[in-house]
Image: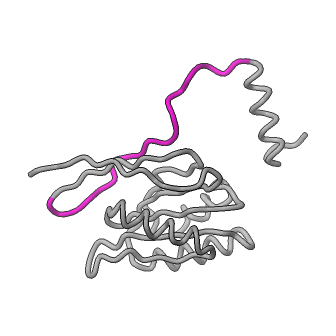
Amino acid sequence: MAVNLISVTVQKPDTVNVILGQAHFIKTVEDLHETLVSAVPGIAFGLAFCESSGPCLVRWSGTDQELTELARSSAKAIGAGHSFIIFLRNCYPINVLPVIRQVPEVCSIYCATANPVEIILAETPQGRGILGVVDGEVSKGIEQEEDITARKALLRKFGYKLQ
């Protein structure tokens, strides 16, 4: 059996976060939508799900037209069965990951990031599967004292730690 490796780069604005995962059922789109709007009032997102049986369509939903179109086109480019992709604006994955993990159809999360993302896929005559992701860049060094100070300041700026 022939297996081809493919890399798909997620196209998105730098300020947008992306969550890539695997699920197992057509109702994933509606359940993820309901989960996201319940988790963060006024959330801006687009999501898409690659159906892997029957008509094998990219199923989609969202609250933001631009992010929904990004999700639709990204899912089509990925084309890996039962994968889903969510684009978020004005909130962070940390705000929604716990509730996404509780959706019964969700099997796994590959990444949740604002970094550039490449998805590594295996393609066989049957279809495509996600092998993994490249999230961001290669580490450039070891954190020093001034880096620790900057990290702590950033967490406080975002409101995730007390002053």
Q: Position of residue 20 (x, y in %)?
A: 47, 57
Question: Which image quadrant for residue 127?
Answer: bottom left
Q: Is residue 32 left or right of residue 122?
A: right
Q: Where 48 falls versus 55 (above or below)?
A: above
Q: Nearer the viewer, residue 56 or 26?
A: 56
Q: Where 9 falls versus 21 (above or below)?
A: above
User: Does the segment drawn in magenta span residue 117?
Assistant: no
**Most extreme residue toward the left, as rendered?**
1
Question: Which image quadrant for residue 141?
Answer: top right
Question: Which residue is at a point 43% across and 61% down the rendered structure image?
Answer: 107
The quarter in which the C terminus is drawn is top right
Q: Position of residue 19 (x, y in %)?
A: 53, 57
Question: Which residue is at a point 57% across and 49% down the rendered structure image?
Answer: 113
**Most extreme residue toward the right, as rendered?**
163
Q: Position of residue 155 (x, y in %)?
A: 78, 41
Secondary structure that dominates the magenta span:
loop
Extent of the magenta region: 125-144
User: Does the segment drawn in magenta span residue 127?
Assistant: yes
Question: Which residue is at a point 62% across and 76% down the rendered structure image?
Answer: 63
Query: How is the rendered protein coloured?
Result: one colour
Q: Position of residue 39 (x, y in %)?
A: 69, 69
Q: Is residue 72 left or right of residue 2?
A: right
